[in-house]
Image (spheres, rainbow, N blue to C red):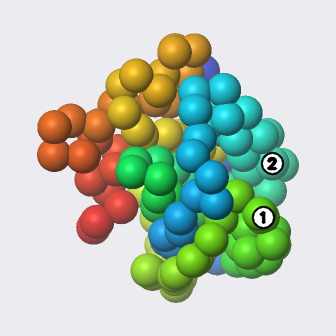
């Protein structure tokens, strides 16, 4: 889902929501094409699962927030734990929430400006401090 797509249905929002934020190290350096493919796959899968969120990639590390129905978050989490692109996975936060932080994005994305060669929708470039408009929401 991106801003041009309709928001999550009220039926999905009526289900109890969970938020999971984790960090991991990329198992190998990722370039623009790799990140573009990861983002597209994540958006498709997340839309099917009713998941919204944000992915931050900087210095070879991921920080990701996924939020949605509890069963969907758990299903996605189990697949992420098996994903060979991630090493040293650590949960930062996990628990029930009343409201989504990233309701308008099946996966917003923040990274260095030069990694946005494809002009990806939902891309929020990092500033000199390594923070973007959306990545700041990961810290709340």
**Would residue 64 be seen by someone viewing this image from the given angle?**
no
- The residue sitting at 34% across, 50% down in the picture is 135
In the visual, does 103 lie left or right of 129?
right
Q: Quadrant of the N terminus?
A: top right
- The residue sitting at 51% across, 15% down in the picture is 117
Q: Secondary structure at mark 2?
A: helix
Residue 83, labelled with which disc? 1
Front residue of this view, candidates 140 and 98: 140
- Percent of width and height locating residue 104: 52, 40
In the visual, does 70 lie left or right of 114?
right
Q: Which of the 4 image quadrants contains residue 47? A: top right
Residue 116, labelled with which disc? none
Return the residue at label 2.
45
Q: Quadrant of the C terminus?
A: bottom left
91 over 10 or under it: above or below: below
Badge 2, how many Cα within 10 Å: few under 14, some, many 20+? Answer: some
Q: Secondary structure at mark 1?
A: loop
- Percent of width and height locating residue 65: 51, 62
Distance (Cα) linking label 2 and label 1: 14 Å
- Percent of width and height locating residue 99: 46, 64
Asked if the residue under mark 1 is in contact with the one under mark 2, i.e. CB atoms within 8 Å, the reply is: no
- Percent of width and height locating residue 16: 64, 76
- Looking at this view, name the residue that lies furthest to the left: 129
**Would residue 87 be seen by someone viewing this image from the given angle?**
yes
Q: Which of the 4 image quadrants contains residue 134? A: top left
């Amino acid at each position: 889902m991106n801003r041009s797509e309709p928001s999550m249905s009220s039926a999905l929002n009526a289900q109890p929501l969970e938020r999971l934020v984790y960090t991991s190290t990329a198992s190998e350096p990722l370039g623009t094409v790799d990140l573009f493919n990861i983002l597209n796959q994540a958006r498709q899968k997340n839309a099917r699962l009713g998941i919204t969120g944000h992915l931050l990639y900087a210095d070879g590390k991921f920080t990701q927030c996924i939020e949605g129905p509890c069963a969907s978050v758990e299903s996605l989490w189990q697949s992420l734990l098996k994903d060979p692109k991630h090493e040293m996975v650590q949960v930062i936060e996990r628990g029930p929430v009343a409201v989504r932080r990233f309701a308008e994005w099946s996966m917003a994305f923040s990274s260095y400006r030069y990694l946005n060669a494809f002009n990806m929708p939902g891309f929020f470039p990092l500033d000199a401090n390594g923070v973007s408009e959306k990545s700041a929401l990961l810290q709340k």
